[in-house]
Amino acid sequence: MASEGPGGTGGTPIVMIGDGTYMMMNSDIYSTVLTGHKMIVVVCDNGGFAVINRLQQAKGVPGFNNLLVDCHVQHPDRPLHVDFVKHAESMGALGRRCDSMAELATALEWAKTTDRTTILAITTDAHAWTPGDADWDVGVPEVSTRASVQTARKQQEEIRAKQRVGV
C-alpha cells in the first residue's frame, strides 16, 4: 500500500479540473481504470471553458463559444450538457454528483475508500472568480476600434512595464 499522503488519501492523487478540460482529457480516466492506477477527480462544472471566457473578456473581446450557453447551436429539446458522472461511469470509473460543498466533502471521504478512479462533479459559477491570480500575458491587438480592446491593450502595456527581465 502507498504511504499515507496529505489529507489521508494513501498516496491517491486528487485532481481538480474544469468541465472543459474534462472534455478534452477524459481518456486519462479510462487509462487509470484500465491500469488500476486510481485517482480522484473533482470536476467543476461551470458550463464550458469559463476561465478562457474570462480571459477573453479581460482582453477586451466579448465572450464567444467558450460557455455552452453562448454556443451557436442550441437544441431546444435537449440542453447542451454532459452528465460527467454517467460519462465517467461508462468508462468504468465511479462517480457522484455533489450539489453543495458539504456534499463534496462527504463525497471526497467516500472517494478515498473506493477501489478505482472516482469522479466527483459539482456545479460552479462560471462568472465568479477568486481574486489574486497572476496576469496572463496574452497578446492584445495594438490597433482596434473597440474601446474595450484599447483599454485592455493599455492595461497590458502597464503590466509589461512592471515585468522584470530574467538574466
Image (tube, grey):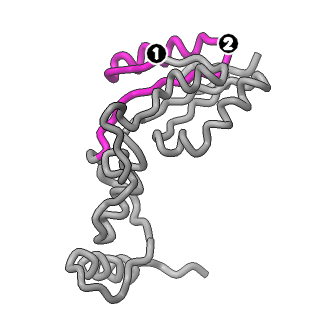
Q: Where 20 falls versus 91 (above or below)? A: below
Report the front residue among 162 and 86.
86
Q: Position of residue 30 (x, y in %)?
A: 69, 29
Q: For the residue marked with disc 1, what is the amino acid? A: Ala
Q: Which residue is mark 2?
A: 115
Q: Quadrant of residue 113?
A: top right
80 relative position to 37: left or right: left
Q: Are marks 2 and 1 in contact (CB under 8 Å)?
A: no
The crowd level at tag 1 (other Cα within 10 Å; few <14, some 14-19, many 20+) is: many
Cα gap from disc 2 to disc 1, whole angstroms:
14 Å
Q: Which residues are magenta?
A: 97-126
| Nearer to the camera, 161 or 141 | 141
Q: Quadrant of the N terminus?
A: top right
For residue 102: magenta?
A: yes
Taking the image as shown, residue 129 lies to the left or right of residue 6, namely left
| Vertical order, 130 against 33 (above or below) | below
Residue 127 position, x and y percent, is 27, 47
Counting from the top left corner in percent of width and height, residue 89 is at: 59, 20
Q: Nearer the viewer, residue 150 or 16?
A: 150
Residue farthest to the right? Answer: 35
Q: Which mark is residue 107?
A: 1
Q: Is residue 56 above or below residue 109?
A: below
Q: Is residue 139 magenta?
A: no
Residue furthest toward the bottom? 143
Q: Earlier in the sequence, mark 2 or mark 1?
A: 1
Left/right of residue 18 with respect to residue 9 in the rendered view: left
- Residue that appears at 34% across and 23% down: 101
Instruction: Please rate how many residues cluster around mark 2, counting C-alpha atoms within 10 Å: few if below 14, some from 14 to 19, many from 20.
Output: some
Vertical order, 133 against 59 (above or below)? above
